[in-house]
Amino acid sequence: MFAMEIENRRRLHVISTGQQSREELVNISKTIHPYLDMLHIREKSWTGAELIKTVDELTAAGIPLRKLCINDRADIAYMKHARGVQLSHHSAPVSLVKERFPTLKIGSSVHSMQEARLACEEGADFLLYGNVYETTSKPGKKGTGIVNLEEIVLSIPLPVIAIGGMTPGRVADIVRTGVKGIAVLSGIFLAEDPLEAARAYYQAIHKEGKQLGETI
């Protein structure tokens, strides 16, 4: 179902930065969520209890569980009925998480063709690939580039979400590779006006730029 949905239109994933308090994260998220398709809670230093409380506060603020993805903590994502879990190289294997938590949609963070193929073989539902451009989130790490992104898109039969240095001005080039969406961290969460930033990214992905309500 997730794969079919994500193919219908391009998606905007927004990822928390690890630089804000829970209160800030929740307040920004409840403002921007009409413009995003998936909110990733990526807070490596938070305890399980803090993550659970965050999910509770997000849902109390009106953000649907179908938009929530918990990074690394499949147990919490499953327990709280979130949409999915995002796994990285230090996480449990995709195949094991798939077996233990079959209702979760599993995203796999990959940085190379080899990693993308392995994630596909193990049963990931979508890929988060990057960093495509240089980004302040990973200072000093050179971007993988558009050519490598397109190769992943053409070679791997999974929805690919591009991440790393995404700006509204770069979206057109990214979209031409055939990606199913983009992921943004500081470009939205650390923006002077997160709502306006989220709207700008959404309108860049969807040229029509129509205003959204709670239905997306």
Image: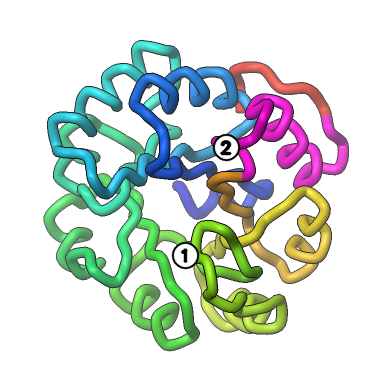
> Would residue 67 be visible to someone looking at this image?
yes
Residue at the location (77% across, 48% down)?
168
Q: Is residue 162 visible?
A: no
Residue 26, picture quadrant: top left
Asked if 214 appears above or below 156 in the picture, the reply is: above
Q: Secondary structure at mark 1?
A: strand
Task: Return the x and y of residue 121 as percentages of the image width and height.
Answer: 34, 79
Majority secondary structure of magenta residues:
helix
Look at the image and give the residue range highlighted in magenta. 187-209
Indicate yes or no whether the magenta region holds residue 200.
yes
Is 155 or 135 nearer to us in this picture?
135
Task: Specify whether residue 158 is painted magenta.
Answer: no
> Which residue appears at 47% of the width and 65% of the height?
127
Q: Residue at x 39, y 74 (%)?
A: 120
Between 38 and 99, the residue placed more toward the observer is 38
Q: Amino acid at mark 1?
A: Leu
- The quadrant of the image that shows the C terminus is top right
Furthest toward the bottom, the residue is 114
Q: Position of residue 183 (x, y in %)?
A: 57, 51
**Disc 2 designates what residue?**
190
Give the x, y percent position of residue 23: 37, 19
